[in-house]
Image (cartoon, helix red, strand yellow):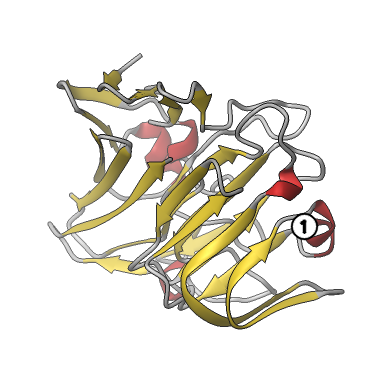
Amino acid sequence: MPRIENEVAVVEVKTLAAEITSFYDKEKNIEHMWQGDPQFWAGRNPILFPMVGSTWTKDYQIDGKTYKMGNHGFARHSEFTVESVSEDTIVLSLSDNEETRAQYPFEFKLTVTYQLSGRKLTITYRIDNHSPRMMPFSFGLHPAFNCPMASGERFEDYKLIFACPETQTTSSSNASLSLNEEREIALDYATFNNIPTLLFEHLRSPYVTLTNGKNSVKVSVAGYRWLAFWTKQNAPYLCIEPWHGHGDFEEVHVPFEEREGTIQLKENGSFTTSYTIEIA
């Protein structure tokens, strides 16, 4: 398993899905990444490509032909190749193959770079279009963090702090949560029972921090149009999810390339996006 380490932190990544399996604070002896538990959610921190979420009908059309793809795309189930490992950097990649082309008829390469500096991990994603035509896709991140982060703490001890005051509303069919020039959301399971996914669009904040005042994870979200927060009832984790694109909120009938948030990558073009995770 690829691993990078310095005097204060350790990061481990697995080749299946190129997921972070560990971001460990050596000084505090705290593991910050959710380890997956089928009782709640077996996932950890999937890369969402080439689709965030799913379509209303669970299939989609390209050039008049219908394709099917699992929720959040296939990168989360794909085996990546390790390109290099150095003292502070891990590089992995996924290229199209027969299995991916059956779900998504494009030639591509997805390269993921993890770079550790102190307690900050920078993750960079580059998507190259090797198809002889425009390639549409959406992209997102789904990292799950242990919450609470240390023994003796509770989920309700934690809160989300935005870098800037925000005026936003997120809602479900039977509840809503509003911020009025506010920076904080106190965490409790009742909120997520009423609104399973807290979803915000066009935030001012370049980052958001999950903290109880003693332990924290700061996630940069600048450049991402949507930001989601998700957990399950009584589950000891919180997902902080920057997205380019989203699943269908209602029934829509449009070609894949016309879905809201879809990125159109020209022939031989490349798209790069990144974010950081900083522990304290």
User: Would residue 262 be found to the left or right of residue 250 on screen?
Assistant: left
Rendering quarter of residue 16: top left
Q: Amino acid at mark 1?
A: Phe
Q: Tell me the quarter of the image containing the C terminus.
A: top left
Q: Mark 1 highlights which residue?
A: 192
Residue 180 point in image, percent of width and height: 63, 85
Residue 270 point in image, percent of width and height: 17, 57
Considering only vertical position in the picture, is 146 above or below 22? below
Rendering quarter of residue 87: top left
Q: Residue at x 44, y 51 (%)?
A: 218
User: Would residue 84 be found to the left or right of residue 104 on screen?
Assistant: left
Q: Tell me the quarter of the image containing the N terminus.
A: top left
Residue at far front of view? 214
In terms of secondary structure, where does tag 1 sit? helix
Residue 24 point in image, percent of width and height: 43, 25
Q: Residue at x 76, y 45 (%)?
A: 232
Q: Is residue 67 visible?
A: no
Residue 203 point in image, percent of width and height: 46, 76
Considering only vertical position in the picture, is 55 above or below 105? below
Considering only vertical position in the picture, is 8 above or below 251? above
Q: Residue at x 52, y 26 (%)?
A: 30
User: Would residue 1 be found to the left or right of residue 256 on screen?
Assistant: left
Residue toward you, 182 or 57: 182
Q: Residues within 10 Å of mark 1 (few under 14, many from 20)?
A: some
